[in-house]
Amino acid sequence: MHTTSLSETAIKILEEKEVNDRNFLDLSQKEFEHHEMKLRLAKKLAKFARLKNTDKIPLFSLQTHEIQESNKHFKYCMAEILVRLKNYDTLVIDSLEAMRNEYVVTILHIAINIIRDSTREELSTRPEYEIINDDSTGQVDFAIKKAENLICVIEDKSE
């Protein structure tokens, strides 16, 4: 049984046309029409995808934590970033994803170490983690887990 507000007929059409996973949420009305769906159904699916793409994001309050420049993890992070900047000469928006990910990974691991030290919680990261559940399915660039519970997913965005 599906937990969406789509009819069984609409879901069957999506399955037949192999429109699935995270790609579904990115499709526009024209793209649904390209899959030979009738205008009314294409409009409904496009609206559904737009709504589902935003209403599943949980609200949270931003929490800040001041990190002292003397923090050993912060010092290590800054040294790593400076080495990369020296080797790559620059980092701009148009940089390759692999290049950007090196910075992201450095900052991510340092942040986890700082959190681990201050909270005594055991956290771990999983690169290229596959998420499969009722609300969403797909691969994310990084996942942060506390014990076996997924607590955060991270996607590289170049914009």
Image (spheres, rainbow, N blue to C red):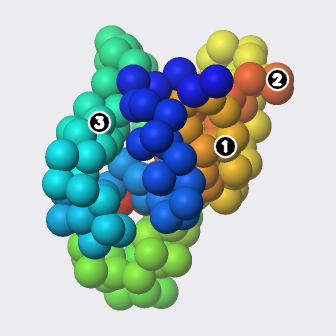
Q: Is residue 125 left or right of residue 141?
A: right
Residue that badge 1 annotates: 131
Check the image and report above or below for 107 versus 58.
Answer: below
Does residue 75 appear in this view? no
Q: Which residue is mark 2?
A: 147
Distance, label 2 to label 1, CA atoms, is: 16 Å
Q: If you read the primary sequence from the N terminus, does the residue marked by circle 1 or circle 3 appear first?
A: 3
Under mark 2, the amino acid is Ala
**Where is residue 65, by image quadrant?**
top left
Q: Secondary structure beneath disc 2? A: loop
Question: In the figure, residue 26 lies in which quadrant?
Answer: bottom left
Q: Nearer the viewer, mark 2 or mark 1?
A: 1
Q: Quadrant of the N terminus?
A: top right
The disc label shown at residue 110, or none:
none
Give left or right: position of 100 versus 117: left
Instruction: State the separation of the CA atoms marked 3 and 2.
Output: 34 Å
Q: Are marks 3 and 2 in contact (CB under 8 Å)?
A: no
Which one is nearer the viewer's eye here, 134 or 157? 134
Q: Mark 3 = which residue? A: 48
- Graded by Cα atoms within 10 Å as few (under 14), some (14 to 19) or many (20 or more), the crowding at tag 2 reads few
